[in-house]
Image (cartoon, rainbow, N blue to C red):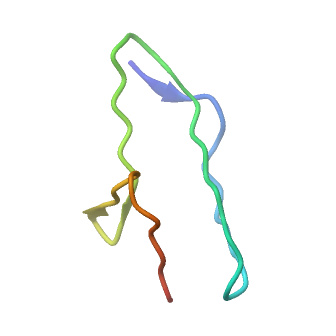
Amino acid sequence: AAHFKTPFRVHRVSKGDSLSIQCEAIGENPIKIEWSKDKVVLNSNTDTRYDN
């Protein structure tokens, strides 16, 4: 089974700041990783911005 090499952690940034998140996973290929926010899959090909 696939598992994450680095544990999840919460990221907080100030308004106007940028954040880049990486993921390292180990397992049998192919491994598919999807990022989501509020159960909506994020598109990695776009410059996504969120206000909380």
The image position of residue 25, as x and y in percent, is 53, 27
* Point 64% across, 56% down: residue: 20
Task: Locate residue 38 relative to residue 16 in the image: left or right.
Answer: left
Q: Position of residue 33 (x, y in %)?
A: 38, 37
In this rendered view, identify the residue nearer to me: 13 or 43: 43
Q: Position of residue 10 (x, y in %)?
A: 64, 64
Whether 51 is drawn above or below 4: the answer is below
User: Which image quadrant for residue 48?
Assistant: bottom left
Kindly identify the residue that appears in the image at 34 percent across and 59 percent down. 42
Residue shown at 26% from the left, 65% from the top:
40
Residue furthest top in the image: 28
User: Relative to residue 52, is residue 6 depicted above or below?
Assistant: above
- Please state, as top left, top right, bottom left or bottom right, where the N terminus lies in the image: top left
Up-down: is 3 above or below 40? Answer: above
* Residue furthest out toward the left: 40
Residue 44 x/y as whole percent: 40, 52
Name the residue rendered at 66%, 36% in the picture: 6
- With respect to residue 27, does 37 lie above or below? below
